[in-house]
Amino acid sequence: MRLTSRLAFMATLLISATIAAAADESYPFKIARPFKAGDAYDLDMIIDNSRTSVITRQGAAKETTTEAFKGDITGRVDVAEVDARGNEKVFSLTVKKFTGGPEGKELVESGKIIDVKRTDQKVDYTMRGGASVSTEIQDILGQFCERLNNSPVTDDEVFGSATPHKAGESWPVDAALAAQQATGSGVQIDPKKIAGQTTFKGVEMVAGTPALRLATTMNMTDAKPTGMPDTYTFDTCEVKSMTTSLLSTDITVPPLEREMNLETKVVIKVAGAEPLTLEVSDRQQEQSTITLVKK
């Protein structure tokens, strides 16, 4: 689950478009698609995020700031090492296109290689050849490669279903396991504050193979990040997410498409000599396509 983590979006790579007449057929679901060392895939990803922050100090006017950043990444990912669940742990990104900012300026030249190493504590980026990896580049990459979630809970347990379903059917998110999985990303939440469902939207043909279109919605209230200073009190922490994905019925193939729309609202009271209230509203959109490279 990506709280960071971070995705309207249309796939163009290897997609040939028709919704199959599969209303009368039930399909099993395998959401988690583990990678293995030596895998490679072509990535095409677009990011469009914005943030509005309002600071209220006692006896002063409100201070409002608005930030936005965009990113567009195309390149080849080579996986060198995975964790126990098949998530990319050590990999390289060979850039074909890497732009960012309102004007879409080039941030990384085509042909450059960025090495990435992820743990459950941090993500390290290294540009081969010695060039620095700027904060702007790291912010964009951070939408694609967050810290590893150290929870043993899988996406199949949270969002999937052990029972095959027909197109149009829905099933609830497992709130208890979603809360447990969230702790692996440093977020604490009462399962009673989680609600959501996954819907099987239909079947599409991709390169001659059926693929399943899924849509998941999830709302969380009173979520609290761990490790925050004692002077911080969370009055509000709301997260709303909508994720659609296209999964091949060939479970060896990674997700073909993914689009995530995430809205977060946080209100924090900060105690101290000059107490203040901070209100932050985030909107994150992430769209990606992945094509496994056969070797």
Image (cartoon, rainbow, N blue to C red):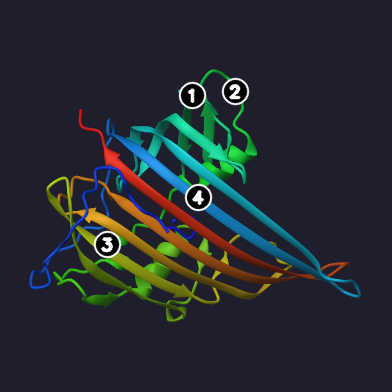
Image position of 288 with respect to 41: above or below? below
Q: Secondary structure at mark 1?
A: loop
Three-letter code, disc 1: Lys
The tag earlier along the polypeptide, 3 or 1, is 1
- Location of mark 2 (residue): 131
Image position of 132 with respect to 185: above or below? above
The tag earlier along the polypeptide, 3 or 4, is 4
139 or 18, nearer to the observer: 18
Three-letter code, disc 2: Ala
Tell me: 259 left or right of 69: left
- Location of mark 4 (residue): 47
Q: Nearer the viewer, mark 3 or mark 4?
A: 4
Q: CA distance from mark 1 to mark 2?
A: 10 Å
Q: Nearer the viewer, mark 3 or mark 2?
A: 2
- Location of mark 3 (residue): 156
Q: CA distance from mark 3 to mark 1?
A: 35 Å
Q: Are marks 1 and 2 in contact (CB under 8 Å)?
A: yes
Q: Secondary structure at mark 4?
A: strand
